[in-house]
Each structure stands twice: as structure tokens, then as C-alpha cells.
Amino acid sequence: MITPNENSEPKYPNQWNQMGTGFKTRPDRCKTIRYDVAVIGGGAAGMCAAIAAARNGAKVVLVQDRPVLGGNSSSEIRVHLNGVNHLKNGLPERETGIIEEILLHNRFHNPQDSYPVWDHILYDFITREKKLDLKLNTNAMRAIMNGDKIESAFCYQSTTEMEYTIKANLFIDCSGDGLLAATAGAFYRTGREAASEFNEKYAPKEADGWQMGSTVLLGSKDMGRPMPFIPPHFTIKYDPEKSHKGRNLIPFDLGFWWVELGSEDDIIGEYEDTKHRLMGYAYGVWDYLKNSGKFPETENYALDWVSSLPGKRESRRFIGDYILSEPDLLGNKQFADAVAYGGWSLDEHNPGGMDNLSEPPSYFHEEFEEPYQIPFRSLYSKNVPNLLFAGRNISQTHMALSSTRIMATCALEGQAVGTAAALCFKRNITPRELGQKYINELQEQLLRDDVFIPNRVANDSNDLVGKAALIMASSTSSGNAQFLSDGMSRDYNGKVHHWQSDGLPAMVSVEWENNVEISKVEVKCDTNVKRNIMLRRDSLENEIYTTQIPPELIKSMDVEARVQGEWTKIGSIDDNRTRRVKFTCDKVVATAIRINVKETYGFQHAKLFEVRCYS
């Protein structure tokens, strides 16, 4: 029998036993750290916000409460990172900028379409960024105020027992639920507005508290032999007789987005109880498929994965200087301060979800002819001067949220507010001041960084190509080399804005009447924005979705400058992996540049949308 040694226990309650070194008092795990910009939430919006702020010169921290990045797209939840996937014409108008860089990074490094690998693709992408620190497993628990401004965020990292006080000039809440913003006293709404308030034809007659629900997804696998299924005790029986025909059970192998529960009350506070019920409903649907006898095709299938973290759609919506609403989207309102766009259908999930089986799982009220604009005034707080937000918590109505909540749309908002925060820091101004006085500077920077703003033409006065005397190409099969400086970086609304060569290799040259100083050349090539490259659970390959690297993407090119009559190479790349290709060199005085395209990832021609030069 082993008896306890009285000397093996600490003599004082504030001490602990560190093996090998004797007794040691518990370390004081508290740190205060300082940044220019603090981003809360590591989903698509938060990642793009943090990267944009860092690339534009700010020192940034990204605080994420989970062990992985990606939010609803992560391996914990596995929702497709949708965007403007299809308009009424059936085609996408795919997002570019940082979110496209991330999706391309995944295509190059995760051809097996693994969700756990996707988590690490995102980790790689974020942690390689200079001026950006990442804090995983860290909750931003409350805002510490100085007057009406946020002075710092009190955070707790569960894996290290570390309490962080994060000080920053600007805070961006991309966390979805918006706890930091809420504890800062930022105005917000929940629930559905009455139709009369914003003249929304699909809103209810009377305002109520209903919020779109969270979903539990599941996946199954063909095991090649009969696989019996015994449901767990918490299973909730699924009743197909009461279910709307829109609750499709086939295909079944990737689960069902409609196993969800909404709330007309405290959807955040109810989350754990909701999760328990959702798991019961998910297993109930699977039990029906396996054991009702009506789906013999499931005989050899077994559950391979069931999410333990329901994916959220709606909770707080913070109030900015403008509340985006359904008529803005359907009427395609043009905003002078537009910084992002969307175009997913008005996809309002029904109140109650699985508790309301008789109604369709979502109403899909209306699709869009073309993308709508999202204004900057909807992306910062009305009453907390140094607070911005991006994602499902922006300033909008419930009906507008039914479309804008899609992750790639949230990512565009994230890049916009990250860029804005960096500009605010540089100028020592608030987001409101930036929107009122410097909105053109913000928009031009976004356009330069390959964000598309529908109907907004770039006109950067610092771009030397805009002052060129001549732009010409070695060969042309479509478009025109002059389009490379027309301010539009994609073909849009049936109008051509590209130059395409006739075969490879190919060359474009830009000439000036007088000498110009050049240190940067930026080229925007083709990734076929009419085809989606997102990670999907089904690895779908068709005219709209692909698992492949876009063959149109340029792989190899170089840039030369004509200096004192002689051509000198100033940049080259042989393994390009982005749509926007940047060449930086020591400053040269030149009268011309030429871009030599050597190879694509499979397309037989070179296709470019824009060329820029800066001194």
C-alpha cells in the first residue's frame, strides 16, 4: 500500500509543484501588448482584415477564440466558402483580392481537398505575413474604455492561462457575435425589422426577435460492406411526414445544411442547449436514412464526421452611419463610399428551423441580376469612434443579412476595413473621418490591391501607366492592349476590359514620351472569375466549380525596362501563384517597359486585365 508523503504537497495554497525543481509559486500570467490595429475573429472577414491592415503598414494582432482559423469554413464546421456564386445568369462573379489569394494558396497546397489541411493552409497564410501576430484559443472578453473609445481589449488564452490586455488605436470586430463591440457599448440590433421600417417586401409585417439558426453538418463514407447504425440516446426522431419537400434527403453523403435551429430570444446564450438539440436532430435524420428501410443505398454507409460546433448565421448586427437594407440590394443602389460587394440570393432561413418542418428550410426570396454594393458607412460603429466591423455583424437589416452573410462577401468587407484601419492609423483619424474626407484614397487602394468594386473605375493619379503615350502588344486574339489602363480589372456586364495574346510567348509594352522613374510594376492576370475555386466537401468539378489551379493563371513572366535605349530586366517570376503579380526593383529611369509572358498553367494564350507602374 502506498501512503502519501506529507512533503509531496505544497505548504501554501498559492504554490504549485513543478516537477524536478521543487515548489514554485504560480507565474503571473498577465501581459499588456500594444498594436496599431487589433482584429477580433479569425474567420474569412477577420483574416482578410488583419492581412490588409498589416500589408498597408499597421502593426496588427489577430485574436481568434478557436484553435484553428477559418470560422464556418474550418474543419470544425465545414461550410463552403461561398460568395457571389451565381447570379440570375447562372454564373459567378468571383471575389478577388486577399480571399482569392487564400483560395489559390489552397489549390496549390491542398489538391486532396482535406479540411484539416485547409486549417493549416490558413495558418500558413496568416503566420507568414509580416507585421501580423496571431493569438489562437484566445477570447476577447470585454472592451476597456477611455471615454467613448476602446482603449484595450481584455483577452484570455485558454491554452496558456494567459490574460492579455491588448491596446490598439483601432479595433475591428469580425467575431460574428461581437462580444467586444457589445461590451464597448456599440449600438446593435437583433431579430427582424418590420417591413414598414425599411420598405422591405420580404420582411414580416411586425418586428420580432427571430434570428436565422445554426447548423450541424455531417459526413458519411462508403465502407464497402453493410454498416448497421444504432442511434445514440440523445437522438431526436425525424418525421418526414411533417417535413417540407425542400428538405432533400438525397444526396445524403455530405449531410444537410437545413439541420438548424433559430431563435426568437437570446440565440447566443442558448447556444450550448441548441447544440445538444441539433446533434439530436442530425442523428435523427441519419437514423431515418439508415433504419427506415426506404433508402437501401445507405446500407454500406457509415458516419465519418459530425460537427461538434454548430455554424452560426445570425446574432448581433451593429449600427453604423448607414443601415444596409433589402431595397438597397434589390435596387442595386450605387454608393459613393462603396468598398465591397455581394450577390448571393436573398436566402432567409425559416424561423425555427427543425422546429418548423412544414415550411421550406430557406425561402430563397430572390436572385440578383448583378452584384450590389456595400458602403463603408455600414462597416464602422455609429457611437464608438475607433471601432469597425466586418462579417455578419455589420450595420444591416435582417433581410440584407440573408444575402451578405456569405463568407466571401464578408471577406471583402474584411479587406475594406483592414485597409481603412491602416489608413486611419497613418492619418490619426477616425473611420468616420476617413469615410467623409478620404474615401477616394480608400477605394483606390482597394482597387490597386485587386478588390473589385462594381461600377467603380480606378483612377490612381500615381499610376504612371495612366500617363503613357503608347500601349501595344506583340499579338492580340481578343480585347485590346489599351484596356490594360482603362481602370476595370475584369470583363463586366458584357463589356471587355482585357487584352489576350494570340499564343505564347507574348509581350506587352508601355512607352512614355519622357523619362519616368520606376520602382514597381504590377500586373493583373486572369484566374477566370466566372468559375469558383473554393474548397468543397464534394470536390465538385463542372463548368462553375473546379478543384484545379486556373489554367488561365500566368505561371512565368518577366519585366524589362528601357534605360538609355537598352532593355534591362528588372523582375521575373517562374512560379507565380496570384492574380496580381508585383515586381519591385531599385528605382530606374526609363522610357518604356515590356512584360514578357512565357507560360500559363495550361491556357494557350496570355490574358491580362491591368498594368500599373509606380515610382
Image: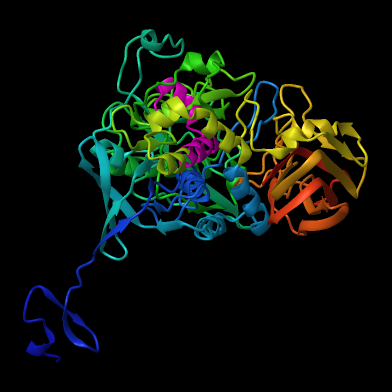
Circle count: 0
Residue 411 included in the magenta stretch of the image: yes
Q: Position of residue 85 (x, y in %)?
A: 63, 32
The colouring scheme, among rainbow, by chain, secondary structure or one colour, is rainbow
State the image quarter where residue 128 is shown: bottom right
Does 101 appear above or below 210? below
Quarter of the image with the N terminus is bottom left
Is most of the magenta stretch helix, strand or loop? helix
Q: Position of residue 40 (x, y in %)?
A: 37, 46
The residue under the point 62% across, 25% down is 456
Residue, far bottom: 1
Residue 545 included in the magenta stretch of the image: no
Q: Position of residue 262 (x, y in %)?
A: 36, 30
- Is 241 or 501 nearer to us in this picture? 501
Does 113 appear above or below 479? below
Does 329 appear above or below 85? above
**Magenta stretch in the rendered image:** 395-419
Lateral position of residue 376 relative to residue 540, left or right? left
Lateral position of residue 159 relative to residue 116, left or right? left
The residue under the point 81% across, 39% down is 512
- Is 207 or 93 nearer to us in this picture? 93
Q: Position of residue 377 (x, y in %)?
A: 43, 26
The residue under the point 82% across, 31% down is 482
State the image quarter where residue 427 is shown: top left
